[in-house]
């Protein structure tokens, strides 16, 4: 395991090694390639946190995907506000599409649930979630 990481006045001990994360992303990419074989899913990457995870996941995948970014805010600082504010391209065509919400960390699940409901009202075919961590 990697040694201690220091950020400012805080010290952290990694619980999961970089190699374990890379291997798991590769496994996830294989599953997604099978799930979407012959298709072209739309990946909605939740900014800003999921950007790097999405980058590694897409590099590991063989399937062609369409990629869009959305901004979802449910925190004020480090505190959940209880409100969800979502910004996405109003011209985004999702009707009858397989959509994958790419999120870095799913905490309570409220944000993912909100996005899933919004996408269903827009007529998506399927909604899946790819997340790096469940908190």
Image (cartoon, rainbow, N blue to C red):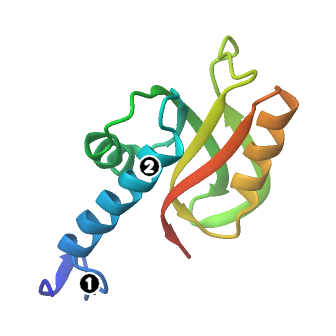
| Residue sticking out furthest to the top | 91
**Quarter of the C terminus within the rendering:** bottom right
Q: Nearer the viewer, residue 28 or 72?
A: 28
Using the numbered discs, state the Cα–Cα distance from disc 2 to disc 1 in whole angstroms. Answer: 19 Å
| Tag 2 secondary structure | loop
At 13% from the left and 83% from the top, the residue drawn is 2
Residue 45 appears at what percent x and percent y?
50, 39
Asked which secondary structure carries label 1, the reply is: loop
**For residue 36, above or below residue 90:** below
Residue 14 is tagged as 1
| Residue 115 x, y percent position in the rendering | 73, 44
Name above or below for residue 2 compared with residue 110: below
Residue at left offset 63%, top offset 43%: 72
Q: Position of residue 81 (x, y in %)?
A: 74, 59
Write down the residue under mark 2: 50
Q: Residue at x 37, y 51 (%)?
A: 29
| Label 1 CA crowd tier, 10 Å (few <14, some 14–19, many 20+) | few
Location of the N terminus by quadrant is bottom left
Residue 20 in the image: above or below residue 45: below
Residue 41 placement (x, y as % from top left): 54, 31
Residue that appears at 27% across and 46% down? 60
Q: For the residue carrying disc 2, how many other residues have a C-alpha within 10 Å: few (<14), some (14-19), or many (20+)? A: many
Q: Residue furthest right?
A: 121
Q: Is residue 42 left or right of residue 88?
A: left
The disc, 2 or 1, on the residue closer to the chain's N-terminal end is 1
The numbered mark at residue 106 is none
In the image, 92: left or right of 118?
left
Along the line of sight, which residue is nearer the eye, 90 or 55? 55
Q: Are marks 2 and 1 in contact (CB under 8 Å)?
A: no
Find residue 88 and report its image quarter: top right
Q: Nearer the viewer, residue 93 or 76?
A: 93
């Amino acid at each position: 395991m990697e040694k201690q990481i220091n950020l400012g006045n805080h010290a952290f001990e990694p619980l999961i090694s970089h190699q374990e994360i890379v291997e798991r992303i590769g496994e996830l990419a294989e599953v997604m390639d099978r799930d979407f074989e012959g298709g072209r899913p739309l990946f909605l990457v939740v900014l800003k946190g999921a950007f790097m995870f999405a980058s590694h996941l897409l590099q590991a995948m063989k399937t062609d995907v369409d990629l869009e970014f959305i901004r979802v805010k449910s925190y004020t600082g480090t505190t959940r506000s209880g409100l969800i504010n979502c910004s996405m391209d109003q011209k985004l065509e999702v009707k009858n599409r397989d959509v994958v919400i790419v999120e870095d960390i799913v905490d309570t699940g409220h944000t993912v649930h909100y996005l899933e409901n919004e996408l269903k009202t827009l007529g998506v075919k399927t909604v899946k979630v790819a997340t790096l961590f469940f908190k």
